[in-house]
Amino acid sequence: MSRDTDLLDAIQTYFDALYACDLSLFDRIFHPACSLFDADEGAVAVDPIADYRQVIAKRKLPLAARRNAKTRSF
């Protein structure tokens, strides 16, 4: 595989992990000691991956929310 393909695969895995709230996918692409950086309105925030994993673990699955909305509309 090329570096570009590897990078695109990692990005897709990240989005899949977010969408499915699947921590096992997160663990495939993030080192346990890494941190995530975010710049919002000029302020930089640093989140250790352990903290971010807790946020993802508590998220409501977008797919489940969409299915529930469709079920209610019938």
Image (tube, helix red, strand yellow):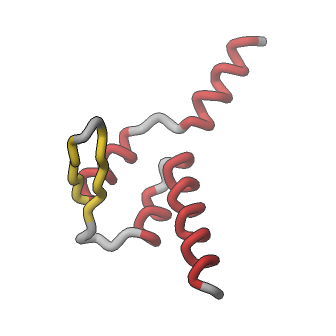
Tell me the quarter of the picture where residue 72 sits.
Answer: top right
* Left or right: residue 12 compared with residue 22: right
Residue ID at (28%, 55%): 37
Residue ID at (60%, 34%): 64
Say above or below: 65 vs 15.
above
Say above or below: 20 vs 26.
above
Residue farthest along the top direction in this orientation:
73
Q: Nearer the viewer, residue 55 or 11?
A: 11
* Left or right: residue 10 compared with residue 66: left
Tell me the quarter of the picture where residue 4 sits.
Answer: bottom right
Q: Indicate the position of residue 21 as horizontal and vertical percent values.
A: 48, 48
Q: What is the number of callouts on the image?
A: 0
Residue farthest along the bottom direction in this orientation:
1
Q: Indicate the position of residue 66 as horizontal and vertical percent values.
A: 64, 28
Tell me the quarter of the picture where residue 8 sits.
Answer: bottom right
Q: Indicate the position of residue 74 as horizontal and vertical percent values.
A: 78, 12
* Left or right: residue 12 compared with residue 25: right
Q: Indicate the position of residue 45 as horizontal and vertical percent values.
A: 22, 48
Q: Nearer the viewer, residue 72 or 8?
A: 8
| Location of the N terminus (image quadrant) | bottom right
* Left or right: residue 61 compared with residue 5: left
